[in-house]
Structure formats: C-alpha cells, structure tokens
Image (spheres, rainbow, N blue to C red):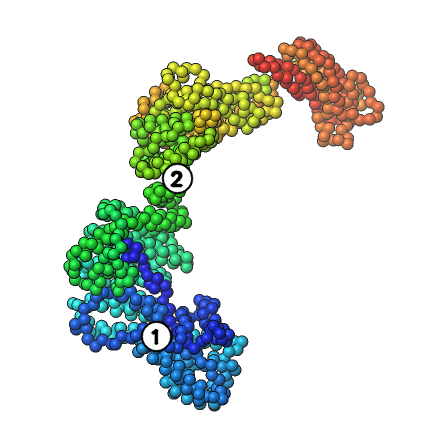
Amino acid sequence: MSWANELPSELLCRPTGLVVLTGLDITYNAIHKSIWDSFCNNRRSDRVPLKFNVMEADHVYPKSKSKRTSYQWYIPKGILKRSWMKKHLNEVPAVVVVFFDLDWDENLWKEKQMECATRVEIVRNSLQGQGTKVSVVLIQKNTPLPPGEDLIASERAASLCSMCDISAKSLYVLPHTDHLIGYTIRLENAFYEQSQSYYHTEARKVKSHKDFLNKTTHQLLYVRHQFKIAFFNELKQDTHTSLKHYKQAYGYMLDLRMYDTNMLEIKTMAGFLNYKLCRLSFQHNTPLDAIAQFRKHIDFFKSRTGTPELAFENSAWMSKQFQVFGDLFDEAIKLGLTALQTQHPGFYYQQAANHSITRKQLCQALCTHTGDLPQNTVLDGLDNLEYFGQRPWRQGHQSIDPPDAQKERDGIIALQIREKQEDHCWIIIPLLSSAVAQFKKYKSPRMKRHLMVQMGEEYFHAKDYGKALMLLNKVMWDYRTERWSPILTSILNLSLKCAYLTARIQDYISTCMELIGQYSQCSIEDKSRIEKNIFKVMSNELPDPEPGLEQTAVESAKTQWLTAKSSPNLFTIEMSTLVSFIECKARFIGDTTSADSKVKLEVCLRVSCPQPIRFSKLSVLFNNQIHNSKCEMSDGRGITAASSPLEADGADLYLLPGKPRTYSFSFLPSAEDVGRQIEISSVALELGNSDNGCCAVLRWVGTGADASGSTSNTMFKQPITPFSVTPAKTTDIEKWLQFKTNPVIKVVSRKAKLDMTLIHQAPSLLNEFYQVQIVIQNKEDSKITDVSLYIALQNEEEYPQDPGAHISIDKASFNGKMQVNEELVLPDLEPGQKLEKCFFMKCFQPGARSILTKVKYTVSVTVGIQSLTCFIVII
C-alpha cells in the first residue's frame, strides 16, 4: 500500500527555518531583483540554513490557534495532522522581513516613515496572531557612516522603530553597493538568530501543554507534542535536542494501546520517528546507535500485523522500513562513513526485497476478489486524510471497534482489490538491483549472484523474458564452475522457458544441451521431452512449449518462433562455457613426428542424453590453417536418432548414450611445419544442416573442455545414475578416463641417410698446405639431387679480419688473397654411390682450427600413396 508507506517529502527533507521577504518587486525593479538573487543564489554550505520566499505584504498566512487552557474534555482524533509539517516548513515563517526604499536624508521623511509603518502593520495583520518575528530593512543608495557618527540617522532610526513598533535590533540598513553579497550574508545571519528565537519559543509553547495532559485519555498527545518539539528544534538546527525529543516520542509510541483499528496509524508514525532517529544518529556519526534503533524498531513491530485480511500491508510496511534504512546507511557512507563486508546497505535492501516478495505472496493468497475497484468507494478521499495513517472511512475514530462494520468490510475488500492491481515485480526488482550493487561493491560475489537469480525470476514474472534470460546467463557460469548442480538445473529450467518465450534459438538449443546431460537433475521424462524439442528445432519445426507457461504467452511465442524459423539459422555455441550432454577430447598420437611421417590424432566423443543422436560433421582446426581441411568427417544422414543402433558400427557420427566413440585422422605435415609445433586450436561438431533447417556448430577450444573446468568433468561429483537413462558400463567409463588429451606435436626434420667422413693426419705445420679428404656416400633408397658441399673455418665470424688460415679446394694454391670458406656443387648420387673430394688448409699462425663441413641435398620419398620432396642438411 504505497499511499500508507511512502514517507512524505516534508519528513525526508532537512528542516530549515522559513524567512519571508516582502516589499521586493523582483519583476520590474532591477535593484530588488539583485537583492533577491543575493539571498537565494549560490547557497553554499557555509551560509546559514534558511529558506527564503518572496511574498506580498498582504499575503494571508495560516491563522494561529487560540491557546487551549484545558484538556479536560478533549479527546484527540489522531496523532499528527498531515498538514502540520508542511505548514511550518512552507507556510508559517519564522521571520517576515519588510524591505523599504528609504535613505536617511530623504526629503519626504515623514511621509515615507508613515508608509513604512503602514506596510509593517499590514504584515502583522496578515500573520493573524502568529508569533513570527517582523524586521525592517531599509534599502539605501549610499554606504552608511559608522554607528554614532550620523546623528540624523540615529534620530530617524529611533523614530522609525517607534512608529513601526519594532526594536532597534529588528531594523537594518542594506546599501546597494558593490559589496551587496557581504551585506546580505550579515543580514541573513541576523535573520537566522531571529528564526532560532522564534522556533525556541514555539517549542516552549508546545512543551507547556504537558501540564494539562493525563496518560489515560491523552496518550496520543504525548507522542504528538514530543514530535512537534523535536521538529521545532530541527528547524532551529539543534539536532541533539531534537534527537532527545524524538526518542521520547518513540518511547510514548511504544506505550500506546494497539489494536487492529489503530495499528496502521501507529506503525506509520513509528516509521516516521524511526526515520528521524536513524537519520540524526547517522548525522551525529553514531552509526551503531542508528543500527540498534532500527533493530529495536523492527523487532517490536514485525509481529504486529494488524487486520489478518490485510496482512500484506505489514509486509509492505516492513519492506519500506528496510529500504529507507538502507538509503540512510548508503547516504552516510557517501558522506564518509566506513562500512563492513558484514554490515552494509545491501543486507537491508535484500530484506526489503524479501518482504516485498512476501507481500506479493500474501496478496495472491488473500486478494481473491475479481473485478476492478468501483469509482465511488470507501477509499474516496484517500489523498486528503486529516491524520497520517488513518483509514478514509473512519477518520478521527480511536475506538477499539470500528464505527461501521459494513464500511469496515467494504474498506478491506477495496484495499485488497487495490493491492491486487499493484505490479509487485516492479517494486521488488529495484530493491534487488540496489542490493546487487552493494554486494558487488563490498565484494560478496555469491550473494550478488543469488540476488541476480531472484531478479531474473522477478523479470520472468513481470513478463520481461529478455532481461530475465540476460541476468540468468550472467550467473550460470559461476554455478557451473562451483559445482552447484541443483541450483544450476533450476536456473536452466527458467532460462529454457525464457528462451522459448522469446524464440531465441541459440539460447534455447544451448540450454537444452545442458538440461539433457548427465549432470542435470531433471527427470528422465523431462530430458526425453527436451531432446525431442532439440530434434524439432534443428529440423525447422516448432518445439513443444515448456510446462507451466501461460497460454497467452505460449501463443505469442509461437508467432515469434514462426518468424525466427522463416530463414535458415547457423550459429556457433562455445562449449567451454557449458556443461553439455556432449563431451569431447582430442589428442595427437605421440609428442613428435618426422617431416616424412603422417601426423596422427584422435577425437573421442561421448553423449549422456536419453536417446541416441546423430551429428552431421566433425572437424579439427589447427594453428596452421593449411591443415584445417584435412581432418573433417561428414555424416549426411540428418540429425534425428537412427532407426537402429547397429548403424553405429559404420564410420558415422551416430552416438549412443554413455558409449565413447573415437575417430582417427592423419595427414602429412608441410615444409613450414618442420622445427615447429602443430597445435589443436579447436574441435567443431555440427548438429543439423543449415540447408534445410537449423545448424548449430558446437566448438571446443583446444582439445575439449567445458565449464566444469576439466575435460573429464571431474568437478561434478554426482553419479551418472539415476539421472541417465541407463548406467554407463565400467569399460566405457574406463575407456573415456584413459583417453588423455595431447594438444601439440612437434615436427622434426627427416633423418638424413648419407655418410660423410673426413680423413686427415694431424698435426699441421705453419705455412704447410694441410690435406683433408672428404668421402660422401648416398645410403638413401633413391637418387639424391641438388647436392652441395660447404666448407668453412668455424671461427671465421670471430676473426673476420685476420682468421690466420686459408682454404683451397682440390689443389694446394695461395695467390695472396685469403679465402676462409668454399661451397661446391656436387653431382647427383645414385643409391650406394660414393664421392671423394679433398681440400687444403694453410695456417699462418699457430693454434687450433675448427673446420665446418655441411652437405645439402634433395630426395624424393613416398609415404603411403603420397610423394614428398625433402630438403636435407647434414653437418
């Protein structure tokens, strides 16, 4: 019941004294406009807390009530009038200031003085007996002389005060000079002192009534008077005294006799007082006092539900109390208060949302009346009640029994109908959103996810299925990795409904794939139904609606599905983010392979769905994309279950539940792979065919892994049974577990089949032509071509200017030009053929010499039915 629980704006604002300025023509007089601007513009925090209004001199203010001399026969009709705070904040000023253009040297002084006194009298008459202070400000053109130096000014000031019946402290001069803002600040400081005096006097007037009260018939007045005294002290900016009187008012509130007919009024006023107490405690930097007060408040009122037929009102009230305290707590933190991970506003927003959820449930249970609220009901006048928290059909009645039983019944029914018309979801969602923001701020991820799931549920109930699906998708990853299988199953079921109602094919298929897997806790019947829906969607048919959906929503969804299926759909599902019914592992056979050997790899697939399923294509992708087309396998028989499991014996993509299938691939590496690694970048498995329906590409990164964090799903400890159709055989489980992934293989050079021998007799003497004989023999199975021999000093790079040696081929010669390396082109060699070559080295300096010899050649080899050309280097 938002009308009963919303705190009025006059309670939420910071009370400031009201000062009314009269005599200023801010429309046509530029000087007056600048004076008004100096008061109301740029109200910094260092200026006094006052509120300024401009009024006409004859503005009629609320009439002052005559002072009551006796409460003997007075029976209060309520605790606090709805108009009282507004009146003292916005209508009854503490000070009325009369501005008047008058210089001390005015020639027509007498006439002007009389005119000013008349204006003051008009203001006094319009105040109708209020205790408001009246001051006069003379707007002058020149800066006045210091006090005592201008005798004419002193004389005329005394005369003016006497004529206007004001004290000398209430007469001020405002020179309109370049220093206007300085004079304005001095004036408002004076007005602030006068306003404090006014509110102090008003509080004493209220306090004086206590002597006339008795606790038998005037319990409500004890609360009312303490509230008023506290409020006047707030207007006076004496918050400590104000807090003391609010506490007294709250204590008197708890002592009131409570029954169903006055429970709403008491709880409404208790909420007001609790708000003031908590706010002032935070303002005084005593947060523990605020928290203690709030807990005391909740503990006292949480079980006082009032009329049973209106129990939802109590939940609504409780929700509002937690929300308001959360707002106060959050505001205090923004102003510098330090919160803890175990004590911050998020907990209060969460409780506010929980109470609103309870309110919705009570509404569904209690509000059974159908139809709309009639135009003329007992709720008429709901917005014009005299007292806070009262019922419109029995205003002013404080008796235990309602004055009119029929009106009471009609009122309850009207309130139930009104409550039924509330959209509770949009009350709950903002509260949950506020709580999520707080738990995120204070690093409580699990609480944040829990609340996001609740938000998703509320968006679902609010029929905003797109937002519900978005929120649920954000949290499911964490529930997968943290092994929350029961929670995950529940969230997936809700996500599936949202995906169906929004006709989002990709989300629908990916959710179905998780729900039919071995880690889902759905029943066998539900898994079979969901798997059949996968077949329907992939065959371009409409899936069956999920159980429990409203018929109107289902009809709308069918229209969206027809639109979505009007064109072929091809989409990719990242399997690393899911815990799917299909598992994948891939591996290379071995860690290394030579350039003239085939690279072998295997892919193992396993499904845990209730029924066998056929996929359309399997492909393995590598870091070197040239090999991507070499490891593909297609099965063009469709995606539905085959007529007989015997078809699985063929080289197809037909998979039986719980039974692993291994697929082997091989290919020859390319020349650029030599010396590098070939890595499996991803495995793709296609479900369906985009030519005549829908195609989902299931993609595993690397050698296959899912959201459980490992390729074997060891993070999930639930057994395969009883959630699978049949238990997996032990041999099948062992086969799956024994399949170890291997994502990379290194391609090494082909081993050379060529002998190279160096024949020489050490040592070598200085300046001697030292002979070295090289014998090369081809041991390949075929002829080698493009043979070349390279000879060099190994340390030639270290001594490029003075290597100290010279090399010559075939004959000993030196023409004075240093030569440190030679490369020769040799003839082709048949299998088994030998070739001899010799070279001479002449050393000019003593020391050790290292000689590098290198032979390069090309040979053609056959691998299977393929022919390769290998370029080989032997050193």
Three-letter residue code for mark 1? Val
Residue ID for mark 1: 60
In the image, farthest residue toward the front:
375
Mark number displayed over residue 469 = 2
Disc 2 residue crowd, few under 14, some 14–19, many 20+, Cα 10 Å: many
Residue at (37, 36) in percent of width and height? 557
Q: Nearer the viewer, residue 73 or 474?
A: 73
Up/down of 323 relative to 849, above or below: below
Disc 1 residue crowd, few under 14, some 14–19, many 20+, Cα 10 Å: some
Q: Where residue 309 sits in the image (x, y, percent)? A: 20, 51
The reply to whether residue 741 is visible in this rendering is no
Q: Quadrant of residue 799?
A: top right
Up/down of 603 relative to 170, above or below: above
Q: Is residue 607 left or right of residue 806?
A: left
Residue at (41, 57) in percent of width and height? 334
Up/down of 849 relative to 192, above or below: above
Residue at (28, 47) in percent of width and height? 360
Q: Nearer the viewer, residue 807 or 219?
A: 219
Q: Where residue 264 sits in the image (x, y, percent)? A: 23, 58
The reply to whether residue 138 is visible in this rendering is yes
Q: Is residue 325 left or right of residue 311?
A: right
Q: Nearer the viewer, residue 387 or 795?
A: 387
